[in-house]
Image (cartoon, grey):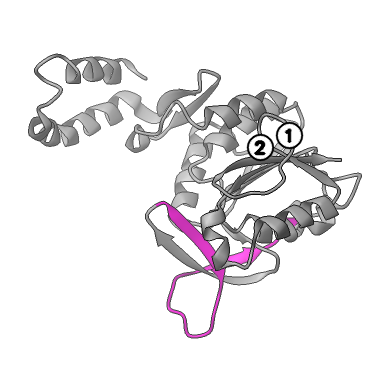
Amino acid sequence: MNLIESISTKVRHLPGLKHLGPLWNVLRPLYQRVVTLSAGSQGLVRVINGMDEVRVLPEWRALPEVYEPEVWTQVLPGIKRGDCIVDIGAHYGLYAIAFAKRTGPTGRVLAVEADPENAEVLRAHVRLNQLEGIVQVIAKALSDREGEAEWHSQDMQSVARPAEEGCEAPKVVMTTLDRVSEGRRVDVVLVDIEGYEEAALRGGTGLLRDPARRPRLIVIEVHPYNWHLCGSSSASLMSFLRGCGYTVTHLDGSPVEGIVQYGHVLAVPA
């Protein structure tokens, strides 16, 4: 947080002032311009979970510094210099940028983001953090086949579904994890795509079953409430991962017997 942000936050929360909502609504555009000017071309510094420095665009100053701390503190310390990482559903790039800084110039981060608007913000954040040589932004949807997908965006649940004839939803290019990885070794995969995680992983069957290339860690944000949209289930996802030679655990290392609620699971080679 820069000096102007820090001072403004303190003033905003002074006794007697913090409840003046209408006043702050009037002042907010001015505050935005001042913050933008103070940030200049360097952006705003955010230290995510007290661990990794990420620069963000001034208009995204509300991006939280505390972000999935249980996952972040478990996964980020395990990133090695030279790692190749695939971030599926990279959103605005918090993970991708932190990955890139830890894997260094000999590493590679493939940041996959299907939402066209998010992908533009992701590219801007990559440039802002001067990581163009490490992070490759792939503005496509990952699934179990190539083709075209419909883009459905509702609140926080944005998903790419295989295109159906006659549908007027915006279209995005659909590809596979096997095509994206292009025969290279992949060390870590992070998946967060609102329920289509199984389809994306099935598109990487060749990678996941190759002992010489397969990831040492797959981090999956599971969304059971959306699985009815794509024919996925706890049983089918677990069966697929086990069939590829992976053991599935919770973040605390305890084995996963079944997935019934939103959260994160880890898959590691058995």
Of the pair 186 and 258, the residue shown nearer to us: 258
Q: Is residue 100 left or right of residue 261?
A: right
Extent of the magenta region:
156-177
Magenta-colored stretch includes residue 175: yes
Amino acid type at image mark 1:
Gly
Contact flag, marks 2 and 1 (Cβ < 8 Å): yes
Relative image position of residue 83 (x, y in whole percent): 76, 34
Q: Which image quarter is the N terminus in?
A: top left
Magenta-colored stretch includes residue 163: yes
Q: Tell me if mark 1 has few (under 14), some (14-19) or many (20+) residues whose alpha carbon lies within 10 angstroms of its own.
A: some
Relative image position of residue 230 (x, y in whole percent): 59, 67
Q: Is residue 141 left or right of residue 12?
A: right
Q: Is residue 219 left or right of residue 229?
A: right
Name the secondary structure under disc 1.
loop
Residue at figure coordinates x 91%, y 46% from the top left: 211
* Residue 104 occupies quadrant: top right
Q: Which image quarter is the C terminus in?
A: top right
Please say if 177 is above or below 72.
below
Can the viewer see residue 178?
yes
Q: Earlier in the sequence, mark 2 or mark 1?
A: 1
* Residue 26 occupies quadrant: top left
Residue at figure coordinates x 66%, y 41% from the top left: 265
Can the viewer see residue 104?
no
Residue linked to disc 2: 134
Of the pair 33 and 188, the residue shown nearer to us: 188
Relative image position of residue 102 (x, y in whole percent): 66, 26
What is the C-alpha distance between the residues marked 2 and 1?
6 Å
Name, please, the residue furthest toward the bottom: 166
Residue linked to disc 1: 107
Residue at figure coordinates x 50%, y 51% from the top left: 119
* Residue 216 occupies quadrant: top right
